[in-house]
Image (cartoon, rainbow, N blue to C red):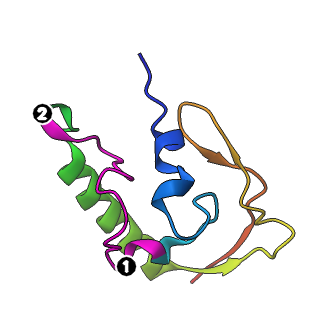
Amino acid sequence: VLIPSSALARDDRHWKIDPNLFYPERFLNEDKHRHPCAFLPFGNGHRQCIGQDLARLELKIILARMLQQVTIGDGGPEFNTGVCIQRLTIMPKHVGVTIQFS
């Protein structure tokens, strides 16, 4: 059984700004009107992912090391359309970036 968590996290009723837009700033301030279960990337309750702390730690380490080595730029509006392909994991469609290694 596969629960479509991406569909649940993109419900318009839970977000002030279109949930399909890439807008990470939406998570900076807690929105008191947002349902607490609107975004649960690791599940919730007794069956939540037991590796979520390790995954977050690994992500921080990888991101810190990567940012020490590269300069990342936007690929332009013709690439970053905000459209995603729905599969087991969400894959962005037409995303472009420029990367310069130092």
Is 52 on the left-hand or right-hand side of 100?
Answer: left
* Rendering coords of residue 58 (x, y %): 29, 57
Residue underneath mark 1: 28
Is 23 on the left-hand or right-hand side of 39?
Answer: right
- The answer to which of 37 and 13 lies nearer the viewer is 13
Residue underneath mark 2: 46
* SS for dot 2: helix
Distance in Å between CA atoms under marks 2 and 1: 27 Å
- The answer to which of 77 and 37 lies nearer the viewer is 37
Which residue is drawn at the image coordinates 18% and 53% (left, top)?
53
The kind of residue tagged 2 is His
Q: Which portion, as a residue range, is magenta?
A: 26-45
Which residue is drawn at the image coordinates 30% and 44% (left, top)?
42
Badge 2 crowding class, 10 Å Cα cut-off, few under 14, some 14 to 19, many 20 or more, is few
Q: Which mark sits nearer the N-terminus, 2 or 1?
A: 1
* Rendering coords of residue 91 (x, y %): 63, 45
Give the answer, above or below, for where 80 lies relative to 20: below
The kind of residue tagged 1 is Leu
Is 45 on the left-hand or right-hand side of 29?
Answer: left
